[in-house]
Amino acid sequence: VMLDPVNEPLAADVVQYFLSIGKPKLTLQVLTAVSSAGIINPVFKEMEALANLALGRTNRAITILYTLIRQHPAYLPGYLTLSSIAASKNDYRLAEKTLRTASSTFATNTLNSIQIAEAWVQYGRTVSNRWQVAIQSTKDILNQVIYTNLDFQTALRLANLYAAIGQYQTAIDIYTELLGRPAIPNEYKDLFILRYLSIHQYVGKQTQLPTAIQQIRQFVGDNPSTLLKLAIVCNESKHPELAAQLLKEVLGTNPDLEAAYYELARAKMAMREPNAAIYVLENARRKFGATYGTEFLTGIAYTIQEDYTNALRFFTSAEIIATTTANGKTNELLCFYLGSVFERLGNYPQAERYLKIAIQLRPDFHEALNYLGYMWTELGTNLLQAKQLIEQALAIDPNHPPYLDSMGWVLFKLGRPKDALPYLQKAALLAPFVDPEIYDHLGEVYFSLRQYSKAASAWQRVLQVKDTPQIREKLARALKRLKPTKL
């Protein structure tokens, strides 16, 4: 390059290479030679700015980009690079001003407008407290774009932008329009399918998903790999029956697709058919041997059946497989299930051990935080620690009825029934059904507060769904405390 600095393609390749391997000083040396040769190319000025940025000369980089934009206002990458650098410096005013200038400069160019909108979305994700500004700016740009005249790739980018800013229905409309086109490029099919179906989940149009699946199948055919992906989306979208139907087709034509057995087992469990799930997993075990997937999912199926002895047997087998593979590690979900099964079997030390491991592996695992906190509460031990764990779970999911119930119950156990009452009342209000455990706890709190009529009412609600001698005894105790009505 030094011997032939006017060779622009060679110079560009060398500059990009030096930047990519972290050699900004060499980059600047090449650029100096190119500049001395009288070459004027905005790409080289942008590279000069990036090299200075890599050397910690941020202000110098910004000055170079300012000059670049002024001299070459039609060079979009200059605006985008300047905005990105400004955002990294927390100079939000400059970042946003630069993107707005770019928006107005390239307003009549659809491809450039989409690229600027993508930059706004990236900016909003990077600077979370400016997300609403980014959304509105993206909307303003997208409102000027007509997607029906766009090529497939550009229309797909546009749909992804609408999905990114929460306008899911518009994204679905674009995807639906694309489905009607005569051909979809093969390189985009998988991305298109998964994106289209996942947006159906976000938008809440669950009833439309089967129709969407059929639309997709019209052009993808019966490829087992694609059908498996469709089935996974159906499982995630709470359409297990549709997932099971697709997976049976997959296994009918490709019985060696191991992942299909696991997804079919998940679908059967979601359909409350654990026996069928166990049968599917037995077939997989005969074909592929005992794997982590066969053992772990079989453990879940037995847990659904409340057969905790067999559940423990298979979870233990899954743990052995997990810890003897190349990575030699277990995972938080398996530890959570092991902890819950040990708790059900009354082995509280082992339950505590595994639940603690689950929390160590994932400190925000709110299900495990609540489970351990509630277990300690029921045992009447480590109550202050239990309260702290439940508080952490509630901080993550503040309106989850079981967590509210746990907080009310631990406060009651700590001798604070007045503080416990609001949590239990809220838990009962938010629960989607009459939860006998929540109402039992409410009864205990009301009784301790000498609100015997409300205690009796709570226990009567329990008896409507779960008639046990213990609850009848509690109800009788509350009714006995009620003062007789004067005639």
Image (spheres, rainbow, N blue to C red):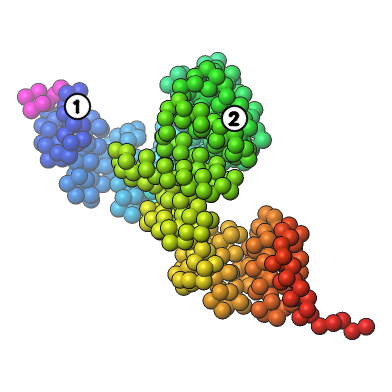
Q: How many marks?
A: 2
Q: CA distance from mark 2 to mark 1?
A: 52 Å
Residue furthest to the right: 487
Q: Give percent across and percent down for residue 155.
A: 50, 27
Amino acid on which disc 1 is placed: Asp
Q: Residue at x 53, y 56 (%)?
A: 344
* Label of residue 232 in the image: none
Looking at the rendered image, the quarter that the C terminus falls into is bottom right
Compared to 453, does 85 lie above or below? above
Reading the chain from its start, which is encountered first: label 2 or label 1? Answer: 1
- Asked which secondary structure carries label 1, the reply is helix
Asked if residue 454 lies left or right of residue 254, the reply is right
User: Which residue in the protein does label 1 denote?
Assistant: 13
Q: For this rendering, which residue is in front, 344 or 208?
A: 344
- Asked which secondary structure carries label 2, the reply is helix
Number of other residues with Cα within 10 Å of mark 1, as a class: few under 14, some 14 to 19, many 20 or more: few
Q: Residue at x 38, y 55 (%)?
A: 357
Marks 2,1: beta carbons within 8 A:
no
User: Which residue in the protein does label 2 denote?
Assistant: 244
User: Looking at the magenta stretch, what is its main secondary structure?
Assistant: loop
Query: Which range of residues does the magenta coloring cover?
Result: 1-7
Q: Nearer the viewer's eye, disc 2 or disc 1?
A: 2
The reply to whether residue 201 is in sight is no
Compared to 433, does 249 lie above or below? above
The reply to whether residue 290 is in sight is yes
Q: Is residue 340 magenta?
A: no
Q: Is residue 6 magenta?
A: yes
Compared to 153, does 104 lie above or below? below
Q: Residue at x 63, y 71 (%)?
A: 422
